[in-house]
Amino acid sequence: MKKVPVTFLFLLFISCALCSALNTVKVKMSGGSRPVEAVEGMVVVKFKSPAPAVQVGLLHNSIGASPSGTIPEINWTAVKLPKGMTVEQGIEFYKNDPLVEDVVPNVIYKTFSTVPNDSFVSIQYGLRTINAFSAWDIEKGFSNKTTIAVIDTGVYGSHSDLYSKIDSNSSRFDSDGNRVNEFPSADICGHGTQVAGIVAAASNNNYGMSGVSWGSQILSLRVFENCVGADEVSISSAVVYAVQQAGYGRVVINLSAGYPPDPGCTGLASSYVNYAVSNGVPFIAAAGNNEIMECPAKLAGAIAVGAVDSSDNVPDFSGKGAELDLVAPGVDVFTTSSEGGFTGSATGTSFAAPHAAGAAALILSALPSATTQQVRDALEQSAKDILTAGKDNSSGWGRLDAYAALSYALGISSSQVTAPQAQAEVKITAFPNPFKPSEHTYLLLDVPIKFLPDDSFKLRIFNQEGELVRTLKSLSWDGKNDAGQKAASGIYIFLLENRTDRAKGKVVLIR
Ligand SMILES: [Ca+2]
Ligand SMILES: [Ca+2]
């Protein structure tokens, strides 16, 4: 029983985005220069050892307070204060009693990663996957101006989470290469709007989602006349236009479209890619959804991006081959939709590439003099190696890590900051144990706090035969398998992992 309140607190933070937040107050600490944020109506007391339980109980009773949980290993007791008593008054009361060694407010911890206030950030798995929260501690994209050219079906420019980000030079191009200014921009098929949200939706604006690069402008260059296809001339014109505009700062091109090479990519494709790259514009191209490397991603100058899902698995459809440079989230990605809302099902390498384009823009914002080769090296060399060791045809150099890429570009040894430390295994306890789903709705895990600031963690539950039963992103289990069926009675082993640590525990399930 003793640890339950603490566990519950963590669960509220982690798996319950819609639950009401803790009531907190600012508490002025004696000797402190500014107030600290703490839980309202609660103090945490350390009693002198040995403090007779009866006397301690009488002390609580004398003001109508009640203990709400203890942490016996370190000898602290959380105390719920009577209604109307402030935290300062509670501290004053306990501090002066001879039974008490120390008393503190229940201070609120904040994570050390950058967490924007956009309401859907918690379900944007792609941001966690690419380590965006840590990347934003280094660069949010405001240090130097950058523009991401979204060469696509257009962008729905009136979207509440995009309109402030759309550049007024946004344009459409016809098949003769003629440009028409199109501002506010419009999206004829919905695809470009989904790409645009991923690269640079308005971020930390208390609304909707967050883009990878908070500071980048979006230049919508619509090359699709209809939903069927876009022609290479209009694409070439759009590329040249994006490269030539002054006042954009450093430009990154994202092209989430292409065609199968037959026999190879056209000379025109080679020309426009080389033009962009030789003029300092990284050219990010989706690898394609037909298992092969499509054009222009196949070209050496393009940075070709394939897809992974939330578990770093490469889907069958993702373009594969020796020319693949890296992979990024591209299955069920959450992003802006051209109906004005959001979608959680954007799937395809189209939505992987913009994660890399956003990361490239962060690098250029931090390092505006970086060459396109330096941007490429940073993205590739810092990618998390997955599948077979080293570069491979299904995942290229590995899965995008925006934080590691920035660290690499800035010359901070990424091994210093991101490499997992020796994976010391920690034991975690489950409550209740045995777990009877007929009586207890959920099994709760009591985990070390180091797992919590960074919600890259994954919980996997195995049966005694070592078969994976359930994969979860929360610290509670309802006793069902991934298919939603009730797990049978038996011993289950759970394994909790984040980027640097792992913890293990056991529970008995009784039906
Ligand atoms: Ca937003
Ligand atoms: Ca690999």
Image (tube, grey):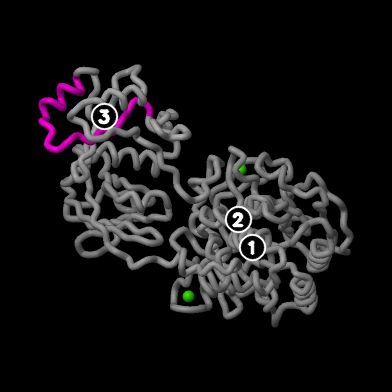
Q: Which residue is mark 3?
A: 79
Q: Is residue 248 above or below residue 119?
A: below
* Direction from residue 473 to residue 393 in the image, left or right: right
> Quick check: 317 above or below 339?
below
> What amino acid type is highlighted by mark number 3?
Val
Instruction: Specify whether residue 307 is in view.
Output: no
Q: What stretch of residues is rendered in magenta? A: 40-61
From the top left corner, tell me how far across and down residue 122 is, in percent: 48, 46
Residue ID for mark 2: 139
Point out the image quarter for the C terminus: top left
Residue at 34% over, 33% down: 105
User: Picture coordinates of residue 373 (x, y %)?
Assistant: 67, 74
Foreground tag (3 vs 1): 3
The residue indicated by pointer 1 is 363
Label 1 SS = helix
Earlier residue among tags 3 and 2:
3
Looking at the picture, how far across and down is residue 458, in whole percent? 37, 56
Residue with the most extreme front position: 31
Quarter where residue 132 is shown: bottom right
